[in-house]
Structure formats: C-alpha cells, structure tokens
C-alpha cells in the first residue's frame, strides 16, 4: 500500500484496485505555471483575468487526470475488468443477503 498523499492532494485510484494512482496537487500559483495556463487575452479587467486563469487551470488539470486514467486503464485487459465486476457483484449479493445494515432499516425484497 502506498503512503498517503500530501495534504490537499486529490488521489485518483485505479477502479480495478491494482495499486496505481494519479495524484493531483492542490491549486497553487506554481501548479498554474506547471500547467502552462495563461489569462484570457480578452479579459476586460484583473478579475476576469484571474477567473480565466482559474477556469483554464481547472480544465487543464481535468484533461491531464482523464488522460492519465485512460492511459492506465488501457493497460488492463477485458478479463481483468470482468473479474472485478464479477467479484463486486458477489460482494453486493453477500451484503444484501446479510440483512439490514442498521437495526431500524427495513429489509429489502
């Protein structure tokens, strides 16, 4: 198991639980520079410029995260996906057959 990420970091884990993860550091001026984000040249004032930088950084980070996840998921086989889906279905079935999670919960049929 890997150590916890630094405070404020968002960690995306592989849904197949292979141990891979993608960390997104918290927003900072340094991160904006790393992302190569600049202000919208059409911004009318400093507030619009700052807002445009924040928005562009958000989208750039989302694109990087999605790309990293897609590239990682491409390393898994269809068989691995099917196995995980099957195991999750078995686990859900076991949990459902165990009865209500809380004493005040109505049993489902």
Image: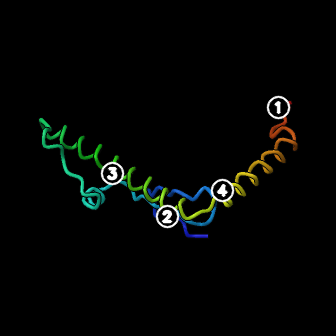
Q: Quadrant of the C terminus?
A: top right
Q: Which badge, 4 or 2, is on the more N-terminal residue?
A: 2
Report the disc number at residue 32.
none
Residue drawn 45% across the image and 58% down it: 9
Q: Horizontal and vertical percent for residue 13?
A: 56, 58
Element class at badge 3: helix
Q: Residue at x 82, y 31 (%)?
A: 104
Residue at x-position 54% and y-position 65%? 4
SS at badge 1: loop
**Disc nearer the start of the sequence (4/1):** 4
Q: Earlier in the sequence, mark 2 or mark 3?
A: 2
Q: Nearer the viewer, mark 1 or mark 2?
A: 2
Q: Secondary structure at mark 2?
A: loop
* Residue 98 sits in quarter: top right
> Is the residue marked by circle 4 packed among few (<14), some (14-19), or many (20+) residues within 10 Å?
some
Q: Which residue is mark 1?
A: 104
**Snapshot colouring:** rainbow
- Kindly report which numbered mark, 2 or 3, lies closer to the viewer in this rendering: 3
Alpha-carbon span between mark 1 and mark 2: 38 Å
Assign a secondary structure to mark 4. Answer: helix
Residue 82: x %, y % from top left: 70, 54
Residue 5's disc is: 2
| Residue labelled with disc 3 | 60
Image location (x, y in percent) of residue 108: 83, 31
Residue hosting label 4: 81
Question: What number of labels is visible?
Answer: 4
Q: Name the side, left or right, on which 24 lies relative to 87.
A: left
6 over 97 or under it: above or below: below
């Amino acid at each position: 198991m890997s150590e916890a990420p630094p405070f404020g970091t968002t960690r995306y884990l592989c849904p197949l639980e292979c141990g891979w993860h993608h960390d997104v550091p918290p927003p900072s001026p340094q991160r904006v520079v790393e992302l190569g984000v600049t202000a919208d040249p059409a911004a009318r004032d400093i507030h619009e410029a700052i807002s445009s930088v924040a928005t562009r950084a958000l989208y750039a980070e989302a694109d990087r995260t999605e790309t990293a996840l897609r590239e990682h998921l491409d390393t898994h086989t269809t068989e691995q996906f099917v196995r995980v889906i099957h195991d999750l279905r078995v686990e859900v079935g076991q949990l459902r057959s165990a009865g209500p999670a809380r004493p005040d919960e109505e049993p489902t049929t």
